[in-house]
Image (cartoon, helix red, strand yellow):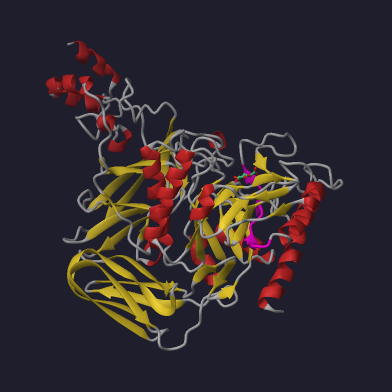
């Protein structure tokens, strides 16, 4: 009877269930509550980008769940963990059926929000909101065909998404920057269907990234949402690249959704190649094929993409893939066997002019336009996997990319769940972009402290990376060490495990003023190529003073001039990526009238204007371009 009395805290539709199952209720209140497993989550198929799909983008209903009252019950037990199961209020997407029924939420009549999009830039009161928001979208299905697989695909949602279809839990996804999918074939019906998603972007110490970062934690369904239909046997995954060891050989694999017997074709009319893979009750078959005709190798000067088509019984998918090798030899970085210099720039996935997460092709094109203007041939996509427009467009424009996972600063190194989370993000990033020729580096960490626990973590994730993709190079942005007398090196043991030794350095900004750079030198005992993955200084656009006045464009410009001199003296240097292309939002930056919540190290201002240092780097890169590529 005592328990019964607490039922008044539940909405009417749940009370009915509880009254009917009094004995069950007693058990529920006494047990330990474990989250229900994601039952419908499936591997994301390769190349969703080019698949026929129904977009669920657009305006979605939403409400803000500040107290998480629709996810947890009043004793903070998640509703979906109760053995009564799947009873998250909002997930039920219901409404009062008569005048006496009590509901304390409604999607009907609620505000609308754009998907894809972060919520912070869409409503004034959400600018710095971190917490839970419930989204709802209805979709119609004309018919449910037998043997047809219906997948619900999200490009990304930051940070945790709980997904419900017609009131049933499809699953949970953790990690803000990678795609995920659910097989919802058995959850849908002909006619109108309800899709409800709770997104929670609260930061946490054990999360990846952890709770301390230097960028704003945009929340929401930030990338495209779509429905995809597949036959029973379909092309789940494939890898088509040049063999780095035999550069006239195409190699990779094709993986199907299930075991199959029969032929699977990989054709490129363009390249005049047909590969027939004979599956014998197999899911995955590897191939290699020597290319006997001459072909154009993908490069920034000539970013040729070949058309490929893969087909199996009722399924086919096409892709555009560039053919190139990226290797190292001693101190050198080689693209198609030739020395390469990376004229780079770092970028966040953010549109400074709009002040929000990038969501579209136009947003991506904006970043590339600035990078191209800079005479760059390379971008470091910091500090998490960016949306898929980036590698797709980079492939066609001939921009090389460094991609990374948000293993940033401090991570809960000894927490196994944290490791698994990071490894999952890495696996999903590689799975999505494994056929993009623009991507040459997988980076595993940024400025992580040199401790034993961290080395264990990074070594493990490095081995995983190599096992997933041997056609690209591995790196991490490390710290430099001071040997005295302005001489620097890398003594981080992780350098041993990277193909390219990369480090961030802020001489002249966090360490002294730019005049310290004239005496600085760098050497590395290992025979490996070196990338300076960051350097920079903050400057408020339009603030002109002198070379030693902080926050002025002049200081930033002077720091660039002095740093370029220092970089020219690094023997193994194969490129660099200054921090950063454009100003970006960061709550760590609170200097009034200068920062106002923005990191001002951009070469492009919040308004999209070029600062003085932009022109300095542009000129430097022009000269490098002429040296390496000819006039
Ligand atoms: C760094 C970090 C980057 C910061 C930058 C800064 O080393 O990698 O995320 O934003 O410095 O501006 O301090």
Above or below, 368 relative to 320:
above
Residue placed at 69% from the left, 72% from the top? 625
Q: Quadrant of the C terminus?
A: bottom right
Dividing the picture into quarters, in which one does residue 173 lie?
Answer: top left
Residue 331 x %, y %: 59, 65
Q: Can residue 221 be seen in this view?
A: no
Give the camera-side residue of 309 and 522.
Answer: 522
Front-most of residues 164 and 31 = 31
The prevailing secondary structure element of the residues shown in magenta is loop
Q: Where residue 467 sits: x, y (%)?
A: 37, 59
Q: Residue furthest bottom?
A: 293
The quadrant in which the N terminus is found is top left
Residue 459 visible (yes or no):
yes
Give the image quadrant in which the ligand numbered 1 is located: top right
Q: In this view, does 547 lie to the left or right of 74?
A: right
What is the residue that sits farthest to the front in this orientation? 525
Image height check: is 156 above or below 630?
above
The residue at 27%/26% (across/down) is: 99
**Snapshot quadrant of residue 612:** bottom right
First to last magenta residue range:
571-585
Residue 507 falls left or right of residue 404? right
Residue 461: image location, x then y, percent: 41, 50
At 36% from the left and 34% from the top, the residue drawn is: 106
Q: Position of residue 463 (x, y in %)?
A: 40, 54
Vertically, is 94 above or below 625? above
Q: Residue at x 36, y 56 (%)?
A: 226
Give the farthest residue toward the top.
2
The verdict on residue 583 being magenta is yes
């Amino acid at each position: 009877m005592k328990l019964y009395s607490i039922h008044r805290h539940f909405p009417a539709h749940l009370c009915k269930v509880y009254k009917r199952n009094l004995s069950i209720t007693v058990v529920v209140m006494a047990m330990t509550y474990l989250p229900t497993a994601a039952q419908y989550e499936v591997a994301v198929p390769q190349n969703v980008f080019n698949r026929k799909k129904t977009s669920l983008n657009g305006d979605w209903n939403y409400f803000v769940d500040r107290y998480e009252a629709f996810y947890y019950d009043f004793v903070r037990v998640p509703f979906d963990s109760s053995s009564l199961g799947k009873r998250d209020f909002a997930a039920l997407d219901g409404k009062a059926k008569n005048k006496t029924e009590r509901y304390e939420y409604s999607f009907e009549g609620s505000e609308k929000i754009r998907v894809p999009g972060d919520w912070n830039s869409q409503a004034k009161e959400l600018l710095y909101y971190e917490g839970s928001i419930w989204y709802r979208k209805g979709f119609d299905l004309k018919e449910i065909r037998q043997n047809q697989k219906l997948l619900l695909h999200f490009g990304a949602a930051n940070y945790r998404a709980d997904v419900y279809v017609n009131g049933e839990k499809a699953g949970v996804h953790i990690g803000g920057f990678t795609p995920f999918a659910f097989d919802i074939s058995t959850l849908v019906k002909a006619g109108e269907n309800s899709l409800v998603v709770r997104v929670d972007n609260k930061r946490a110490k054990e999360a990846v990234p952890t709770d301390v970062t230097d960028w704003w934690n945009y929340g929401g369904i930030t990338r495209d949402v779509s429905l995809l239909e597949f036959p029973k046997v379909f092309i789940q995954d494939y890898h088509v690249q040049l063999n780095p060891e035999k550069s006239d050989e195409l190699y990779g694999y094709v993986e199907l959704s299930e075991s199959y017997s029969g032929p699977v074709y990989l054709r490129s009319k363009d390249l005049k190649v047909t590969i027939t893979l004979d599956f014998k009750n197999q899911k995955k078959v590897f191939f290699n094929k020597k290319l006997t005709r001459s072909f154009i190798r993908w490069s920034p000067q000539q970013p040729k993409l070949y058309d490929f088509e893969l087909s199996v019984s009722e399924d086919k998918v096409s892709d555009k893939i560039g053919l190139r090798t990226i290797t190292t030899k001693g101190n050198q970085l080689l693209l198609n066997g030739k020395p390469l210099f990376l004229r780079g720039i770092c970028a966040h996935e953010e549109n400074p002019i709009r002040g929000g997460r990038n969501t579209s092709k136009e947003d991506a094109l904006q970043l590339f336009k600035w990078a191209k203007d800079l005479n760059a041939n390379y971008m470091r996509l910091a500090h998490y996997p960016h949306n898929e427009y980036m590698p797709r467009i980079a492939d066609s424009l001939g921009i090389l990319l460094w991609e990374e996972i948000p293993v940033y600063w401090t991570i809960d190194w000894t927490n196994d769940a944290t490791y698994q989370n990071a490894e999952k993000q890495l696996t999903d990033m590689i799975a999505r972009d494994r056929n993009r020729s623009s991507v040459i580096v997988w980076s595993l960490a940024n400025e992580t402290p040199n401790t034993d626990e961290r080395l264990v973590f990074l070594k493990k994730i490095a081995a995983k990376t190599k096992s997933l993709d041997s056609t690209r190079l591995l790196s991490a942005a490390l710290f430099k060490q001071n040997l005295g007398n302005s001489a620097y090196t890398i003594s981080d043991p992780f350098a041993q495990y990277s193909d390219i030794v990369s480090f961030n350095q802020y001489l002249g900004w966090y360490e002294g003023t730019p005049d310290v750079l004239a005496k600085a030198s760098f050497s590395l005992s290992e025979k490996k190529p070196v990338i300076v993955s960051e350097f920079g200084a903050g400057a408020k656009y339009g603030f002109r003073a002198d070379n030693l006045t902080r926050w002025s464009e002049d200081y930033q410009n002077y720091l660039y001039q002095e740093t370029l001199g220092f970089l020219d003296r690094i023997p193994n240097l194969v490129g660099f990526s200054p921090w950063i292309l454009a100003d970006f939002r960061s709550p760590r930056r609170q200097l009034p009238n200068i920062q106002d919540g923005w990191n001002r190290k951009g070469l492009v201002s919040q308004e999209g204007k070029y600062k003085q240092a932009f022109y300095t780097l542009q000129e430097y890169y022009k000269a490098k371009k002429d040296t390496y590529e000819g006039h």
